[in-house]
Image (cartoon, coloured by chain):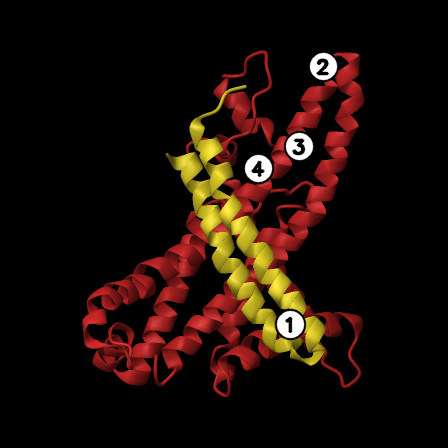
């Protein structure tokens, strides 16, 4: 699967070709149909997977939970309590469905990066994080406008109280850029770049180990070390993937809190 | 093997966020060690700071590929 792009390019020469950004351009399954690519199918697959899991987990709710129910409720409880209640405060229940969808969707799509046979994090294609960040962007601005009215909301962003008047020349553009450019950009690029870099890192060690195997006998001896590092990095990647899903949801919750707050 | 100066530049740019991440978690560990019950309060703050510092390194990574 990794080699598919490289094989179609036909640019391989004798030496080792380190993996680059081109390795993320997987060809479509059906020729000419640019929609049916692996990341798209993985995104749909993840939605199916999450739906089935949580429907099964919540179908037979009992006072003494089964193992499945317990697993589902732990994930839900984590998002509701640690990300919703502790961050947003008393109005948190309105936002728990969004936070929960976001968290599970990102988590499952990230973990696809290390599941054998799938091994492609959907979020390493930049369009997916862009869309998620855009949704968060509209959600928190919409909430802010609904709560304060558009003029008071923009005034709250642009003119922080308790600042000397001349300082507004500097602070107002910075605050506007923070709310309308930096926040959605950092939110999407952080997720994208983490998944991209992590996948590239694994590619380097796995393809490197494979290339060493085809070398002289001295190089063949070193090759297993490359694979061992690749396995260790896979576990590291698992940690990063969970962390990124957590951070994306946490930041969304924090932005919502900021929009709801009476004084910015 | 070939490459561009971009990659050296990214290596240099990653030093700052690396140090920053170390400082953030050092402060977090210190805080939890002194007052273990403050862990739940400190954890989101620590990860938020970590995410902000790490974003800078990742912008460098993206730019290293784009430029």
* Mark 2 surroundings within 10 Å by alpha-carbon count, few (fewer than 14), some (14 through 19), many (20 or more): few
Callout 4: SS:
helix
Query: Label 3 is found on which chain of the structure?
Result: A
C-alpha separation, residue under disc 2 versus residue under disc 3: 15 Å
Dot 1 corresponds to which residue? B31
Q: Colour of chain A?
A: red
Q: Could you tell me which quadrant the C terminus of chain A lies in?
A: bottom left
Query: Label 1 is found on which chain of the structure?
Result: B
**Disc 3 and disc 4 on one polypeptide chain:** yes
Callout 2: SS:
loop
Seen at 45% across and 51% down, the residue is B56
Labels 2 and 4: the sequence-earlier one: 4
C-alpha separation, residue under disc 1 versus residue under disc 3: 37 Å
Is the residue A247 above or below the residue A16 in the image?
below
Dot 2 corresponds to which residue? A215
- Between residue A188 and residue B38, name the one nearer to us: B38
Query: Label 4 is found on which chain of the structure?
Result: A
Is the residue B8 above or below the residue B27 in the image?
above
Given contact means CB atoms under 8 Å apart, are the residues at marks 2 and 1 in contact?
Answer: no
C-alpha separation, residue under disc 2 versus residue under disc 1: 51 Å
Q: Is residue A47 visible?
A: no
Labels 2 and 3: the sequence-earlier one: 3
Left/right of residue B22 with respect to residue B51 in the rendered view:
right
């Amino acid at each position: 699967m990794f080699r598919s792009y490289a094989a179609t390019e036909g640019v391989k020469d004798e030496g080792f070709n380190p993996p680059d950004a081109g390795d993320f351009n997987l060809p479509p399954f059906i020729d000419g149909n640019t929609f049916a690519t692996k990341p798209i199918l993985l995104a749909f697959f993840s939605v199916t997977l999450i739906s089935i899991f949580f429907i099964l987990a919540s179908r037979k709710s009992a006072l003494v939970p089964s193992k499945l129910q317990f697993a589902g409720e732990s994930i839900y409880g984590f998002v509701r309590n640690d990300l919703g209640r502790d961050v947003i405060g008393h109005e948190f229940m309105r936002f728990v469905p969004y936070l929960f969808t976001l968290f599970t969707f990102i988590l499952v799509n990230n973990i696809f990066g290390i599941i054998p046979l799938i091994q492609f994090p959907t979020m390493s294609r930049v369009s997916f994080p862009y869309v998620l960040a855009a949704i968060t962007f509209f959600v928190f601005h919409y909430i802010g406008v609904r709560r304060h009215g558009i003029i008071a909301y923009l005034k709250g962003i642009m003119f922080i109280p308790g600042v000397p008047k001349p300082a507004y020349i500097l602070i107002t553009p910075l605050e506007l850029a923070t709310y309308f450019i930096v926040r959605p950009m950092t939110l999407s690029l952080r997720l994208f770049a983490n998944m991209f870099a992590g996948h590239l890192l694994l590619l380097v060690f796995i393809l490197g180990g494979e290339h060493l195997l085809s070398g002289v006998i001295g190089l063949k001896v070193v090759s297993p070390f490359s694979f061992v590092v690749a396995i260790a990095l896979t576990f590291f990647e698992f940690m990063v993937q969970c962390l990124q899903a957590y951070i994306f949801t946490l930041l969304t919750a924090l932005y919502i809190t900021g929009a709801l707050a009476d004084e910015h | 093997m070939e490459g561009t100066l971009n990659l050296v530049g990214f290596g240099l740019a990653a030093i700052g966020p690396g140090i920053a991440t170390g400082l953030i978690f050092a402060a977090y560990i210190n805080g939890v060690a002194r007052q273990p019950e403050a862990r739940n309060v400190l954890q989101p703050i620590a990860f938020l700071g970590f995410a902000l510092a790490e974003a800078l390194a990742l912008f460098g990574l993206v730019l290293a590929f784009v430029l």
